[in-house]
Image (spheres, rainbow, N blue to C red):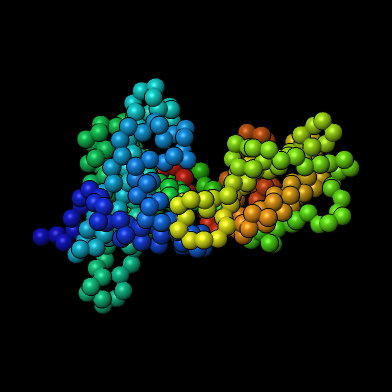
Amino acid sequence: MSDVQVRPFRRGDRDQLTMLINAHAEVVVPGMSASVNTVLGSLERQPGEFIEDPWVSERVTLVAEQRGRVAAAAHLLRYFPDERAGESARDAGDIRWLLYWPAAPAGNPCWPDATGAAEALIAACADVFGRWGVTRQHAGGELPVPGVYGVPEQWPHIAALYRGAGFSHTGHTEVVYLASVEDLPGPAAGSRPPLDGLAVSRSVGINGCRQSAVLGEEVIGYVETEILDTGERLSRHGGWADVGNLHVAPGYRRRGVGYWLLGQAAGWLRLAQVTRLLNYAWLEGTDPGGLNYDDYRVFLATVGFRELTRTARGWTRE
């Protein structure tokens, strides 16, 4: 008889589930973790995903219990099959995340290998998709913490599990960066902007505080930063933020405007006692505004960002 039981999540699993999530988060982003309340809340809804979260018609969280331990867990989403969901998700089942403990200490009889538990769990996920009757199946690793999504390269056990279950990576790859705010360029007293007459204007942006580079009557660029450690979103103290947008008009690129904007943002974040700043870029390609991601990644390295991971987004099964 198997020692693995796949069953619905129970509230009593919350501490072990949070430990499993945080173990996978902190291997990608140093010091990153979620509180128990954050994890429980994320199983019910994703308030920050105000576009896609209303598309979800059903949510299921499963755990694989092995010898009294939560050895693996998965969170599944079902999207509406009609106009209530966007076309990209319509009538899809999504493994929002699936995690398991990948290694067992050699010779330790109290810590069994969890690979079998993970395989039983992903088979149960497929059964749920079958009952739902969805026409498309997606998978990923969008944890309820900043900077951890897709299948990062630090999770080879998850990538292998997905591939073994018939999923393939059909999307793109993103690079996640981290910088210490104190290492970023800052507005030095008495320093001149890169262009005569260039000034900064602060306003509410779509992804945090927007600081715009204004030349005369023209906005030639802007940066948006969002502070992430408000309320219960993170369980450890210390300021975290991420770059929501950084844009410079094509005619003003390679003239120091982006560097100057980042310095303005860093100065503002220091006042807010933010110490760490996340940023993201596609591994290749060009964004809708014409930004070449190869150039952007060179820029990030130049100003002090460090690459944390490369993560594979968009896993599908036919």
x then y, percent, for residue 28: 48, 59
The reply, left or right, for residue 202 in relation to residue 39 is right
x then y, percent, for residue 55: 39, 31
Is 87 located above or below residue 164 in the figure? above
The reply, left or right, for residue 259 in relation to residue 83 is right
Residue at 34% x, 42% y: name it: 44
Residue 283 appears in view:
no
The reply, left or right, for residue 24 in relation to residue 74 is right
* Figure disc tally: 0
Residue at 14% x, 59% y: name it: 2
Residue at 30% x, 70% y: name it: 104
Is 97 located above or below residue 182 in the figure? above
Residue 228 appears in view:
yes
Q: Residue furthest bottom?
A: 107
x then y, percent, for residue 61: 28, 46
x then y, percent, for residue 203: 68, 38
Residue at 74% x, 52% y: name it: 263
Q: Residue furthest left?
A: 1
Q: Quadrant of the N terminus?
A: bottom left
Is 86 located above or below residue 253 in the figure? above
Q: Quadrant of the C terminus?
A: top left
Q: Quadrant of residue 154?
A: bottom left
Q: Residue furthest top?
A: 83
